[in-house]
Every structure is written in C-alpha cells, then in structure tokens.
Image (cartoon, helix red, strand yellow):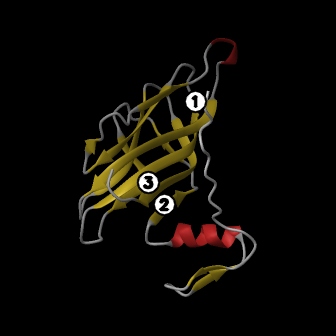
Amino acid sequence: MGSAAVRITQVAVSTPFDNSTNGFTANNVQAAIEEARNSPGVNMIQASASINTTSTTDVVMTGQTYTNATGAAIKVVAEFNGDVTISATGGVLSTSFYLNGVQIADTLRKQMADQGALAGPSRFTASLLTKVTIPNGQTLDVRWSTSTGTITAAGRVLMLTRCGDF
C-alpha cells in the first residue's frame, strides 16, 4: 500500500499578513480572517433576531437573501446555517436555496423534531451548501416551511464565496 502525499499550506501566522493591493496589513490570524470576510470575494449576511414561520409552503427566510448587483454573473459556493427550533413533536422543517424564485435542484433538506421519549421542542442547526451561478440582477435566497406548528430561527448566516469555474 502506498501512502498519499499530503501538502500543508500555511495561510497565516503571527507575523504580518500583507495585502498591499488594498492597503491592509494584519498581525494575526483573526485579522486575516476579517479581511477575507470583508473582501469582495466573500459576502456574509448575518441575522440574529428571532423569526418564526407557520407556513406549510416555502417562504423567504427574513434576512437571508442576496441580489447580485455586480454587473455580471458570479459563480459562488453558497453556505447557510441557522439555529432552529421546531415546536411540534414530529414537525418537519424544510429548507432550500432558491434562485430568482425557483428552487435550486438537490438543495432541499428536511429535518424532523424529536419524537417518542424525547418529544417536545427540538433545537438544532439547519444547514445548506451548493454551488451556483447568480446572473446579474437575480436573487439567491433561503426559503423554509414547516409540516405543522411553529418553527423559530435565531442566529443565521448566508455566506457566498466567489470561485472560478466549477
């Protein structure tokens, strides 16, 4: 049996991180992360206020939309995660990505509340991940619905990372 080669790339250390093209210099890993988070290649849409839905059909999750206004189509890896509570025993949360009002194939995820001895409100992290091309002027959003009862979402993040061809 052969062993696979592993390549380790150092991305940041406690020495200055220099990105002189935008005048930014950082002295630690956290500052480098902040630069990446605030760079034109990453869009992070955060929302912390709790929201609820009782809709049995998909509706836009408040605060989790992005409209491409760059003047050109962009290719992104889209990630969503959120702190969700399902109030009804056996209730099912459905989440998915939509592009300009159309569900993106294979992004639907369903999660069910605890049943039996663990019945009652269930709290967990809902998450989605996909790659998508967003044409100029079109909107990517997260939509959600419930099979029964109320679903509450607290802290949630929609992060879009631009990438090359995929």
Q: Distance of mark 2 from mark 3, alpha carbons?
A: 7 Å
- Label 1 packing within 10 angstroms: few (<14), some (14-19), many (20+): many
Answer left or right for 7 relative to 165.
right
Helix or strand or loop: what does disc 1 sit on? loop
Q: Residue 153 at x, y = what percent? A: 54, 44
The three-letter code of the residue at mark 1 reads Ser
Residue farthest along the top direction in this orientation? 116
The reply to whether dot 3 and dot 1 touch (C-beta < 8 Å) is no
How many numbered discs, if any?
Answer: 3
For label 3, the SS is strand
Looking at the image, is 33 positioned above or below residue 19? above
Q: Which mark is residue 45?
A: 2
For the point 24% across and 72% down, which residue is it? 71
Task: Please state which of residues 17 and 100 is positioned toward the viewer in this rendering.
Answer: 17
For the residue marked with disc 3, what is the amino acid? Gln
Badge 3 or badge 1: first in the primary sequence: 3
**Residue with the mark numbered 1:** 87
Q: Amino acid at mark 2?
A: Ile
Task: Indicate the position of residue 14 as horizontal and vertical percent values.
Answer: 76, 72
Give residue 136's position: percent from left, percent from top: 24, 64
Which picture quadrant has residue 146? top left
Q: 76 left or right of 124?
A: left
From the viewer's perspective, is residue 59 above or below residue 11? above
CB of mark 2 within 8 Å of CB of mark 1? no
CA separation in Å, label 2 and label 1: 26 Å
Depicted 131 relative to depicted 63: above or below: above
The residue that disc 3 covers is 64
What's the residue at 64%, 11% (across, down)? 116
